[in-house]
Image: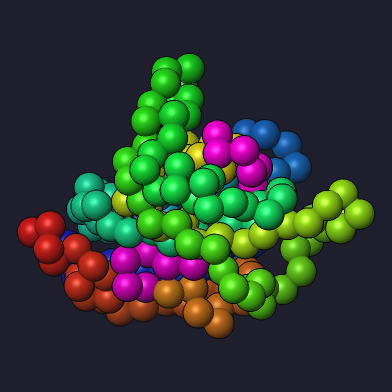
Amino acid sequence: MGTSEHHHFIHHKPYGYLCQFVCELPKKKLVGSLFDFPIGTMAIGRLDEQSEGLLLLTTDGQLSEYIRSRKIEKEYYAQLDGLITDEAIQKLQNGVEIGIREVKYLTKPCKVAMLETDPDFSPRTRKIRDDRHGPTSWVSITITEGKNRQVRKMTAAAGFPTLRLVRVRIGNILLGDLVAGEVKEVIDLLNLIHSAISEEL
């Protein structure tokens, strides 16, 4: 697991791309087209098509399963429709009810904080709705789960739909200054993320 015979990557997934290498749907943009990835590369967890930010990839299936099985923190910056209230933040922190495959699910307690200043992200390829439609706010949401479209469903359940979602951290690996579409190969992904999962061992 994590030996030199495998390849590992840190990627800033752009808006509008699927975390896939093959897709039967026409005209879909795929992460696999952004870099000359070796055969067998897979994403460790996914971001939906409209979401952006940090994505880890590897050719090591055992490593992928190992990382996904750990309760690793994943931090997102979410731009919300409206000025989020303290009450809504508390609700998100305690857990909200969302739907997962038509089954009700109560999310686990998580960390939520309003950002004092808007993050300095590059403009998205598809423009966020016009300011004339009302104010927006940015929050940091840190979860250890990975349900389908979880953060979007959580903020909607709290009354503040997500307009833009960017994953900025997985464990102790940061998105940092990687620009949208950039791929960085790393030698030892397990070592980079190890301090984030050591308490689970």
148 displayed left or right of 1: right
The image quarter containing residue 104 is: top left
Residue 125's place in the image compared with 96, above or below, is below
Residue at the extreme left of the image, as rendered: 201
Image coloring type: rainbow
Is residue 10 in the magenta section? Answer: no
The quarter in which the C terminus is drawn is bottom left
Q: Residue at coordinates 36% horizontally, 51% vertically from top-left?
A: 110
**In the displayed structure image, the side of residue 33 where residue 126 appears, left or right:** right
User: Whole-percent x and y of residue 163?
Assistant: 70, 50
Depth check: give the residue in front, 155 or 173. Answer: 155
Percent of width and height locating residue 47: 52, 50
Check the image and name the residue furthest to the right.
132
Instruction: Name the residue rendered at 40%, 48% in the picture.
Output: 93
Numbered range of the magenta stretch? 157-173
The question of residue 165 being in magenta is answered with yes
Whether residue 171 is visible here, answered yes or no, is yes
* 54 with respect to 93 (left or right): right
Q: Position of residue 90 (x, y in %)?
A: 44, 48
